[in-house]
Amino acid sequence: MNRTRVQILLGFLLVMVVVLSVAGGLVYRSISDLLIRNAESYVGETAKQASARLDAVLAQVDSLSLQLVTDARIQQLLYKAKTGEVLTIDQKLSVRPILNNLMALSWLIQGIELYAGDEPLYPLENQNISERIGLETATFANIKEGQLIWAEMQRKESGHLFAVRQIRLEDDYLGRGGYAVFRVTDSLLDFFNTEFPTVKGSTMHLFDRHAQLVASSSPSLLDSVDPAILTSTAAQGAHSIIQIQGTDYLKIVRQSTETNWSILMLVPLDTITEGLLVLKQALLWALVIGAVLCLLLLWILSSIITKPIRRLRNKMRIPVFALPQQNDEVYFNFEMNELNISYNNLVRELHQLVQTVYEKERLNNQAEIKMLQAQIHPHFLFNTLESLYWTLIEKQEEEGAQTVIALSKLFRYTINAGSNDDWVSLNAEIEHCQRYMEIMKYRIGHRLHWQFHIDPLPYDIKLPKLLIQPLVENAIQHGIEPKVGASSLLVSIRNVERDGKSLLGIQVKDDGVGMDTETLAALTQKLEVHHQPDPHSSSSSSGMGLLNVQRRIKLYYGQEYGIQFQSSPDRGTILDLYLPYGVERNV
């Protein structure tokens, strides 16, 4: 799991699965919604046509009922009954042919009953109108003034519905003369499955204005459902979905303009969305195939990304006791090239650092060899110098004795330069220079005048051993000794501010023979090109000349530090050296 290739594969695979799942879900949902909308539109149109067909059938009943109540013979009989004339049985039976002719005109009308006022006219043994169809409907029929009114469903007989129409008498100035009751078959929806193309499993149901079931193509389906919920037209989400007996149905409700009844159509959602099974399988296969292709492409892509990384990693693996080598390979990837450039820069800096440490060790070893050459029988040398000192004391040659003591201390300091501790205090280095100056004054005599000017310094200074004495030696050897006459030498040590930095300034100034421009330029160039030491640059008791001093300064303090010269013929030479404070001793 911690490999880049595995992380890339898992990350992209997770993203792909999420994207394909979300996209597939949206597609599936959109198509499902589209199918439901199309089915809703189609079934809604079917329900609209069925409602129109039902209105036409009911309008036929209304038309026949109007024809009946306006028939002249029936009007005459009812007028006689209203005026108090007693109708004979033959008169009452005379309406039978009229009723039979009307029933023959419509398959819906199964029977017709006439009432003179509230009393039965035909059939003879019938109940009064209030008992037959209910007081509420009769009263409602009076209010409606001759319109066809459908009785309540509780008055429904087996297989029949009741429709009532009040009869207005023309001879009585349209006064109430009686009622006509029509027994209509409840098979009002028989035309649905024969005259309309339907969706598989769909059913149609007819409810009256009180949400009571009038007719149904599948009555048992609605046994456990509240009719008020079935006939409600309130929106229920994007689609009107209802669950009946564990099955989801699409519900379509339309109102009849003739009776204000409701036509309900129920279509199983499974029937509408059965085509989505193929789509679901196609989406699943697309997900699987997409995952396989994605894995293949990601494997290739991860190989393109990780292969250069592996090659660079193998290049960076180095054997024991060996230095890393630069990688010259050029990659097609910008980031890999940037990483390779950084690695090559690191290798170059490492090589340079190793070379610097090597040069430092080489110089130290060179100095140690030269010190070892001076350590031939050191005890014998020191004992001899001590014997010489006491001999000069006995002969009362004080000056010679002091020179011998200075020479002994000079040798001891120089010989100890090969020790492990190559850093000394500034005071120790100055004392060593002073001893050297005393010896040189004894050798040169009155021609040499020297002095040290040391300012108070803000730090306890540590610097490499034998750093100042070779500068003084070079000034005496090349500047003062060749000059005829007296000469002076000034060594100044002070605190200097340069470029916002506080530096240790060391200056060696003489008024010797000096150098011309060409000699000064050659010396400066020689000090700048310091890759190989030149043993002939100068000679000193320590065996270290200006070139070695310059190399040690740059190794310890950096390339920006070094010796600077100012000189002119017969005016002397000024040597300046600026060093930073606080440099670690093992730099």
Image (cartoon, rainbow, N blue to C red):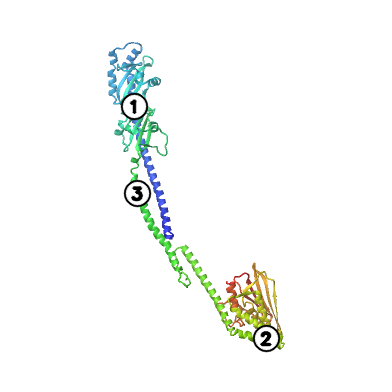
Q: Residue at x 44, y 67 (%)?
A: 314
The x, y position of residue 408, in whole percent, is 65, 83
Find residue 93 and report its horizontal and vertical position in percent: 28, 16
Frontmost of labels 1 and 2 is 2
* Residue 518 visible in the picture: no
As shown in the figure, which amino acid type bears the numbered disc 1?
Leu
Disc with the residue nearer the chain's start (3 vs 2): 3
Per the model, the C-alpha gap separating discs 3 and 2 is: 112 Å
User: Which quadrant of the figure has residue 305?
Assistant: bottom left
Residue drawn 57% across the image and 82% down it: 372
Q: Which mark is residue 282?
A: 3
Circle 2 — which element?
helix
**What element does badge 3 sit on?**
helix
How far apart, in angstroms, are the residues tagged by discs 3 and 1?
50 Å
Please identify the quarter of the rendering in which residue 161 is found: top left
**Which residue is denoted by mark 1 in the rendering?**
58
- The amino acid at mark 3 is Ala
Tell whether 150 sits left or right of 488: left
Task: Name the residue furthest bottom.
Answer: 395
- Examine the rendered structure and indicate whether residue 99 appears above or below residue 12: above
Tag 2 or tag 1, which sits nearer the N-term? 1
Verify CB contact (< 8 Å) between mark 3 and mark 2: no
Give me the C-alpha separation between circle 1 and circle 2: 154 Å
Q: Considering depth in this image, is 95 or 237 the residue closer to the camera? A: 237
Vertical relation: 208 (above or below) 522: above
Dot in front, 3 or 2: 2
Across and down, in percent, residue 53 comes to 33, 30
- Which labelled disc corresponds to residue 389? 2
Indicate left or right for 572 with 254 as reference.
right
Estimate the x, y position of residue 37 in percent, counting from the top left: 38, 40
